[in-house]
Image (cartoon, helix red, strand yellow):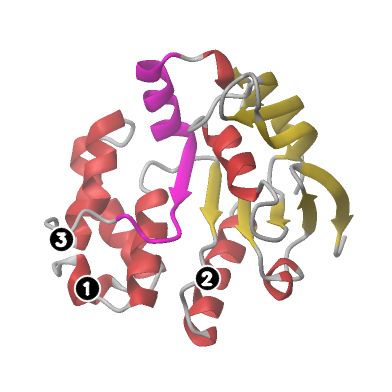
Amino acid sequence: MRTSNLIQLKSVSLNYGPAASPYPALQDVNLNVASGEHLAIVGSSGSGKSSLLNMITGIDHPTRGEVEVGGTKVHTLAEGPLALWRGRTVGIVFQFFQLIPNLTILENLLLPMEFVNVIPKAERRGRALSLLAQTGIEAQAHKLPAELSGGEQQRAAIARALANDPPLLVADEPTGNLDSRNAEKVLAIFRAQVAAGKTVVVVTHERNVGAEFGRVVTLRDGMVVADERSRP
């Protein structure tokens, strides 16, 4: 059920390059995302999708405008508080998994819990194993990432993003490197998270993936050119 806005972007612009000849990655973007929404951000390569995701997660700061997530003005945070805020508030699923190669899958899930100290120490291992079970890869808990298939690594990355029970899950092209069978498994996990009350924001260039989301925002040349709700 949608409630108040979890994400608010107000007149956000992002320029790359020197001030004398900047490249506008985002141009005056206004976007509100309610708690519990299932949102796809779509557009061609270079449209600003990943830049917009980086605004929401605090990876980049806007050249102009304001970014507020969960009542926190993200664009005002220094690096230390920003890292702590991100660890507690946002689960990030990267396109190329970004699992730590010399840690087991279970250890990859335990590490973010240790970093922000939200989950009590006695509960961390059980929570990690439960998340791996929810994503269907509990049998892979003690393997290294290289021993898993691409689809299994992506599900491990999702489980890791959920480690600290964040209200917001964001994913950058999460199905771009997967076959249709594994892509559907990933999308099913996202649907389950929305059903459980989380907000899920996915960046994709695949319109057929975007079509299954409750809301689709289209970017072109760093601007929002369409904002459609695909179902009630």
The reply to whether residue 131 is visible in this rendering is: yes
Dot label at residue 176: 2
The numbered mark, 2 or 1, whose residue comes first in the sequence reads 1
**Circle 3 residue:** 104
Relative image position of residue 221 (x, y in whole percent): 76, 47
Q: Is residue 42 left or right of residue 160?
A: right
Secondary structure beneath disc 3? loop
Relative image position of residue 103 (x, y in whole percent): 14, 56
For mark 3, does the 10 Å Cα neighbourhood hold few (<14), some (14 to 19), or many (20 or more) residues?
some
Relative image position of residue 102 (x, y in whole percent): 11, 57
* Between 22 and 113, the one nearer to me in the picture: 22
Q: Is residue 95 above or below residue 111?
A: below
- Amino acid carrying label 1: it is Gln
Q: Please report the bounds of the magenta region as a residue range.
A: 78-98
Q: Is residue 30 left or right of residue 132?
A: right
- Amino acid carrying label 3: it is Thr
Q: Is residue 83 above or below residue 143?
A: above
* Between 73 and 21, the one nearer to me in the picture: 21
Location of residue 129 by image quarter:
bottom left
* Between 18 and 26, the one nearer to me in the picture: 18
The numbered mark, 1 or 3, whose residue comes first in the sequence reads 3
**Circle 1 residue:** 140
Secondary structure beneath disc 2? loop
Q: Is residue 99 above or below residue 6?
A: below
